Image (tube, coloured by chain):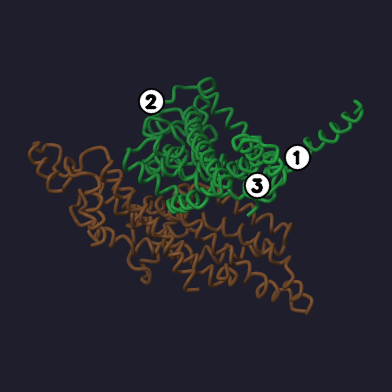
């Protein structure tokens, strides 16, 4: 085999890899959504560095309007809330908590769920049990799990995260199983068996690697929904506790000032909307580019 | 057909059991002593012990669970720790408003969603398609509480057009309709998106099938092709979607009821949890879970009725 031959294969692979990125970024909506996500996640991560104030410190300037209002000041770009705390600072910290809830729930639930699905597809004897378990879990919608867990543990971020993670498991198990079943029918699995690979090696090297991208896409599609439910639970007073800043809870606090200071409820709601919209648009585009099979 | 329904019913048994275990765990695992809550913070220990004894809280967990099952079978869910009314009475009063809200929401959002999805599919790639799909993605991404707050603020407070607190009466009365309008509008708005998306992709898929081509070939008008041959088959996945999204809708209803102070099961559940009223919280969660199981059961049966292929499986 000559060097030239290897070079040509690499050249063939390289454009393909660039192609899916390009196709993704060529979709203007998707590019915009990705940019928004990067910006929001970056701002949330850097909150302690870039936030202009202390998120818990009140000032005498209560319910100051944002800067685009004629009474607004540049000292508080997004105004202040009902207790005189800087809105921009609290939005930055609140986005952190909201994203944390969504990311932890989706990653933990998604991993556990897809692992369950892969195991069910790999060890066919376990399949009926796993799937029955999944059926039972599917009958508990996220919001009910959230309500039940909060009733037992009490309000807080963690019961919400746990509930959302558990609610993510069954869907991911189902999709993981259906993807894995089609992979299991491929010839390389049989080939791997024939060469005498152990089950563990077969599972790890062949099954997981061939399923992972489809599963990741599916999980990313769930992210927006999970964020929305988490924010709704916090809005109801079942999630984050004051004085923690969390977007859903901030919107709830703004409810009482809707008449004279609508920005206190509107700004956090809009931030949630932008996060979820960006996640949905980016997830959809990613699926269309990488794995159109998953389209429903 | 009967077999499908029977099968489905059989499948709900483990689910039902899971719901009951969860409901039971809710009361037994909850921190804080229910007897203490009932007796009040100032009660002497003897009174608390007496209540514990009366409620059988010191028995083994299995005994408590069996006793709990027996009570549930008799329809006895205990008494609210706060109002001291029976949980069944509290729930009974809240079920009808919630069902009304669901009906009032679905009755406009499903037809509109289907219409939007069909138009988007028929004019695929056109500006109409783009607008409809943008609206539906935006709709799926909006926090329900934001929709509620905006509607209250604009329609309720600024325009003074519709009331936004509580329930005005049964659905068939004018006041009832006026009061349910805003909650039903809010809840429906989050449901249009998924319905439109599902209808669009399902109509697109059906329009590619042979029988649609045949219908076109024999010279039927495009309108007839789409309505009679396209949409009719495309509606099957939409029916399943309603089952899949029932949890989503339930979550929306919990938030909507709470914001509009609408006296349904969702608001009851949230109120009970926030005030540590465990028997009531447990009853409300039980009813919500049962409703969810029931909706899925109905959807599965509908699915079997609409799609003859299911019965053969």
Please tell me which residue is depicted at 22% across the width and 59% down the height of the picture. B76
Q: Position of residue B258 (x, y in %)?
A: 36, 51
Residue pointed to by mark 3: A184
Q: Position of residue B26 (x, y in %)?
A: 30, 45
- Secondary structure state at the residue bearing disc 1: helix
Which label lies toward us, 1 or 3?
Answer: 3
- Secondary structure state at the residue bearing disc 3: helix
Please tell me which residue is depicted at 54% across the width and 26% down the height of the picture. A45
Chain identifier of the brown chain: B
How many C-alpha atoms fall within 10 Å of the one at disc 3: few (<14), some, or many (≥20)? some
Q: Earlier in the sequence, mark 2 or mark 1?
A: 1
Residue pointed to by mark 1: A20
Which label lies toward us, 3 or 2?
Answer: 3
Residue pointed to by mark 2: A60
Q: Position of B30 compared to B161: left or right?
A: left
Colour of chain A in the image: green
Q: Quadrant of the C terminus of chain A?
A: bottom right
Q: Earlier in the sequence, mark 1 or mark 3?
A: 1
Q: Position of B189 compared to A58: left or right?
A: right
Pinpoint the chain carrying mark 2: A
């Amino acid at each position: 085999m000559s060097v030239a031959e290897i070079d040509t294969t690499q050249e063939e692979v390289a454009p393909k890899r660039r192609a899916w990125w390009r196709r993704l970024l060529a979709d203007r909506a998707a590019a915009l959504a990705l940019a928004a996500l990067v910006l929001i996640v970056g701002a949330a991560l850097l909150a302690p560095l870039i936030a202009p104030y202390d998120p818990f410190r009140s000032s005498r300037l209560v319910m100051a309007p944002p800067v685009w209002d004629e009474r607004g000041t540049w000292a508080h770009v997004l105004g202040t809330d009902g207790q005189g705390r800087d809105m921009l600072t609290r939005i930055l910290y609140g986005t952190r908590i909201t994203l944390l809830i969504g990311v932890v729930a989706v990653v933990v639930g998604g991993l556990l769920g897809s692992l369950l699905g892969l195991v069910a597809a790999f060890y066919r004897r376990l399949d009926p049990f796993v799937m029955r378990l999944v059926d039972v879990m599917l009958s508990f919608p996220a919001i009910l799990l959230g309500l039940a867990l909060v009733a037992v543990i009490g309000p807080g971020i963690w019961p919400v995260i746990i509930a959302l993670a558990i609610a993510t498991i069954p869907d991911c198990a189902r999709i993981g199983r259906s993807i894995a079943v089609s992979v299991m029918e491929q010839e390389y699995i049989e080939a791997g068996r024939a060469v005498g690979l152990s089950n563990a090696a077969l599972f790890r090297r062949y099954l997981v690697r061939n399923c992972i991208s489809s599963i990741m896409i599916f999980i990313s599609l769930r992210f927006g929904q999970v964020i929305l439910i988490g924010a709704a639970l916090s809005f109801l007073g079942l999630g984050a506790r004051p004085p923690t800043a969390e977007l859903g809870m901030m919107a709830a606090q703004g409810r009482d000032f809707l008449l004279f200071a609508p920005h206190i409820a509107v700004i956090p709601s809009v931030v949630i909307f932008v996060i979820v919209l960006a996640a949905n648009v980016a997830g959809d585009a990613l699926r269309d580019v990488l794995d159109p099979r998953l389209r429903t | 057909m009967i077999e499908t329904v029977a099968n489905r019913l059989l499948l709900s048994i483990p689910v039902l059991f899971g719901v009951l275990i969860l409901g039971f765990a809710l009361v037994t695992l909850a921190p804080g002593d229910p007897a203490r809550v009932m007796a009040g913070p100032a009660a002497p220990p003897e009174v608390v012990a007496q209540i514990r004894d009366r409620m059988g809280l010191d028995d083994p967990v299995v005994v408590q669970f069996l006793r709990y099952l027996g009570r549930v079978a008799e329809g006895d869910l205990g008494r609210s720790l706060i109002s001291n009314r029976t949980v069944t009475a509290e729930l009974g009063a809240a079920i009808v408003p919630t069902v009304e809200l669901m009906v009032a929401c679905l009755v406009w959002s499903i037809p509109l969603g289907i219409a939007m999805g069909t138009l988007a599919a028929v004019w695929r790639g056109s500006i109409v398609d783009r607008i409809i799909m943008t609206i539906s993605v935006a709709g799926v991404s909006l926090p329900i509480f934001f929709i509620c707050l905006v509607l209250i603020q604009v329609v309720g407070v600024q325009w003074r057009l519709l009331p936004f607190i509580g329930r005005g009466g049964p659905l068939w009365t004018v006041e009832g309709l006026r009061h349910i309008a805003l909650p039903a509008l809010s809840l429906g708005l989050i449901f249009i998106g998924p319905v439109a998306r599902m209808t669009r992709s399902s109509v697109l898929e059906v329009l590619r099938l042979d029988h649609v081509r045949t219908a076109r070939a024999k010279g039927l008008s495009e309108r007839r092709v789409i309505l009679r041959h396209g949409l009719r088959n495309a509606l099957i996945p939409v029916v399943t979607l309603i089952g899949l999204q029932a949890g989503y809708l339930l979550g929306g209803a919990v938030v909507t009821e709470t914001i509009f102070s609408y006296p349904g099961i969702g608001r009851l559940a949230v109120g009970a949890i926030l005030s540590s009223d465990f028997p009531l919280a447990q009853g409300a969660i039980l009813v919500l879970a049962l409703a969810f199981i029931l909706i899925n059961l109905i959807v599965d049966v509908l699915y079997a009725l609409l799609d003859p292929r299911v019965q053969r499986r």
